[in-house]
Image (cartoon, rainbow, N blue to C red):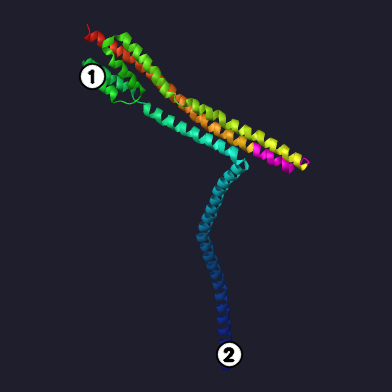
Amino acid sequence: MKKVFAFVAMMGLLTFGVNQTINAQETEAPAVEEVAQEDSAAVDSIAAPETVEAEAAEVDEEEGQGLHKTIKIKFIEGSAGFMSLVAIAMIFGLALCIERIIFLSLSEINSKKLLEDIQAALENGDVEGAKSICRETRGPVASICYQGMMRIDEGLDVVERSVVSYGSVQASNLEKNLSWITLFIAMSPSLGFLGTVIGMVQAFDDIQKAGDISPNVVAGGMKVALITTIFGIIVALILQVFYNYILSKVEALNTDMEDSSVTLLDIIMKYNLKFKK
């Protein structure tokens, strides 16, 4: 009896132990799988940004190279001879525009402060000090004021004629090289249209040689014609924007010179009334 009881007890213990082992293995297996999934997800999350950044960099590089290559290809396809002429017109036109912008920017001064300094010097009877202020200040306004101060003792009429005459000279200096800019603005689309006409002539020559109207033959000549026109119009638009900006600065300086001339004449008239009588 004791042996039977011991056998049954041992079988129960073995069964319980086996069940516990199986349950533990079943519990650990999903945990291991979850850990493995989490590790793989973490690795993917770490690698993903690097991969995305690398792919983005490759795409940007391909786009940059694509644009550069596209421009080069279109330049060559548009007949290098005429495209070079359009490019030369753009280079010279932009050079003149930049020169005018720099010159006009340096010509702009605080004319109100200049006239106030001149008036303060004249109120103290210091004509030479007023002339020195004009000499040490850059720009057409200061030059006009200096010409007027040089003839301050010759009467208001002489000063007025001197200011008006020298103002015309300064206005001409401000408008220097603007005619050349307009020339390049007109030349750029004209060269493009010339390339268009020549491209059309080449297309008809190719059709005549082929003896048949082939889409490939016609498309080649039309492509050259349209590319030259596009580039010519783009160059003309760019130069036109700079030209209009330059004109606005010239107009502003001319207005400033006129206003400053009137104010200078008033200051000189007050000086003459105060010290000459």
Prevailing secondary structure class for the magenta stretch in the rendered image: helix
Quarter-of-image position of residue 83: top right
Per the model, the C-alpha gap separating discs 1 and 2 is 133 Å
**In this picture, residue 154 sits left or right of residue 246:** left
* Picture residue at 60% right of the left edge, 30% below the top: 190
The tag on residue 223 is none
Name the amino acid, label 1: Glu
**Please, which residue is most extreme toward the right here?**
212
The tag on residue 128 is 1
Locate residue 89, reporting x and y percent: 53, 34
* Picture residue at 57% right of the left edge, 34% below the top: 234
Check residue 63 for magenta coloring: no
Nearer to us in this view, 227 or 30: 227
Quarter-of-image position of residue 143: top left
On screen, residue 25 above or below 226: below
As helix, strand or loop, the secondary structure at mark 2 comes to helix
Locate residue 178, reporting x and y percent: 47, 26
Name the amino acid, label 2: Phe
Q: Which residues are magenta?
A: 211-225
Locate residue 227, reporting x and y percent: 62, 38
Q: Which residue is mark 2?
A: 7
On screen, residue 201 above or below 131: below
Q: Residues within 10 Å of mark 1 (few under 14, many from 20)?
A: few
Locate residue 269, reporting x and y percent: 29, 10
Assign the C terminus to one quadrant of the image: top left
Nearer to us in this view, 62 or 107: 107
